[in-house]
Image: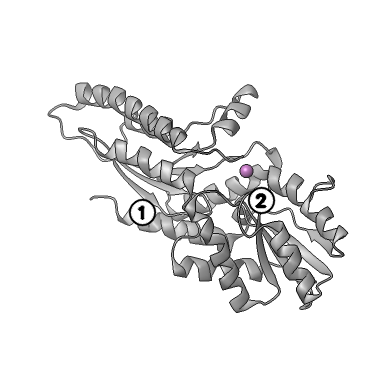
Amino acid sequence: MRKSGWSIGFKSALAALVLAILFSGIAWAGGQGVHKEKKTGILLVAFGTSVPEAQGAFANIERKVRAAFPGVDVRWAYTSEIIRRKLAKEGKILLSPAEALAKMQEEGFTRVALQSLHTIPGEEYNDLLHTVRVFRHQAGGMDVTVGEPLLSRHEDMERATEAILAVVPKERKPGEAVLLMGHGTPHPANAYYPALQYYLWKKDPNAFVGTVEGSPSLDDVVAELAAKGIKKAWLMPFMSVAGDHARNDMAGDEPDSWKNVLAKAGVKCVPILKGTAEYDTIVDIWLDHLRTAMGQLKE
Ligand code: CO
């Protein structure tokens, strides 16, 4: 589910620009010379998921956001065009970040705190920043601030590491591995995954992270487990939802799923199909980033 190249980023920024110009025209016609009343909203932006069972993770985030900011409108947008198209065929209309911001502007929002529900500041997050820049820089534009993804600063790395290790099932014995499955990306921000490995090892020498599409790879992890003589691993997705990657690439029945590749290497696996957004202590990190973004909105 990766998209590649700067062209898509450019395309979405361009689409944002066109939408922004269209709607700023409407805003101008309606609000010229009149002091606009302040209207604050929150826009939650996720990669998206088409797996219905994974929706619970997003519902959990929304519930916590509404409780933290009572009375503030909460909207959603998905950055994945593939997921949006797939959902549209089922009659579920999810907006892109640019469309959601344009719609909020049309509805008279003047301040929007946007929270990235991505895991690392990779391609999706950077495209988001391009889109937001366009909305910020138009005449009479909205004030839009952006909350950082889950892993951004040193404190996030420490908090996320502690939070994920704390929810490993209690049945796990010290000689057994915890293996997190991250997404991984060709974007330079892939370096967050080897960084996460460093933080994990500071807390637990048998905690590992591998990625589906980046580095460390599953091969890297298999080699680490073999070197340590580990025979059992608890598999946990390090993605906001336990969607397609968790269900198929990690725990699926195909011979190349992580579960089966590890079994072949002599490591018995226990997959846990729960996304990071289902754990309150992880959601709290995103929530604190949203709090910062809310605080950055102009009075
Ligand atoms: Co993917």
Spatial separation of the CA atoms under disc 1 and disc 2:
31 Å
Image-quarter location of ligand 1: top right
Kind of residue at badge 1: Ala
Q: Are marks 1 and 2 in contact (CB under 8 Å)?
A: no
Q: Foreground residue, 87 or 257?
A: 257
The quadrant of the picture occupied by the N terminus is top right
Which dot marks residue 28?
none
Residue 162 appears in the figure: no
Which dot marks residue 212?
2
Q: Earlier in the sequence, mark 1 or mark 2?
A: 2
Q: Find out if the beta carbon at label 2 lies less than 8 Å from the nearest ligand 1 atom.
A: yes
Q: Nearer the viewer, mark 1 or mark 2?
A: 2
Q: Foreground residue, 271 or 181?
A: 181
Residue 19 appears in the figure: yes
Which dot marks residue 293?
1
The residue at the far left in this view is 33
Which residue is located at x 65 percent, y 36 percent? 50
Kind of residue at badge 2: Val
Mark 2 surroundings: few (<14), some (14-19) or many (≥20) residues within 10 A: some
Vertical relation: 133 (above or below) 281: above
Left/right placement of residue 192 relative to residue 225 reads left
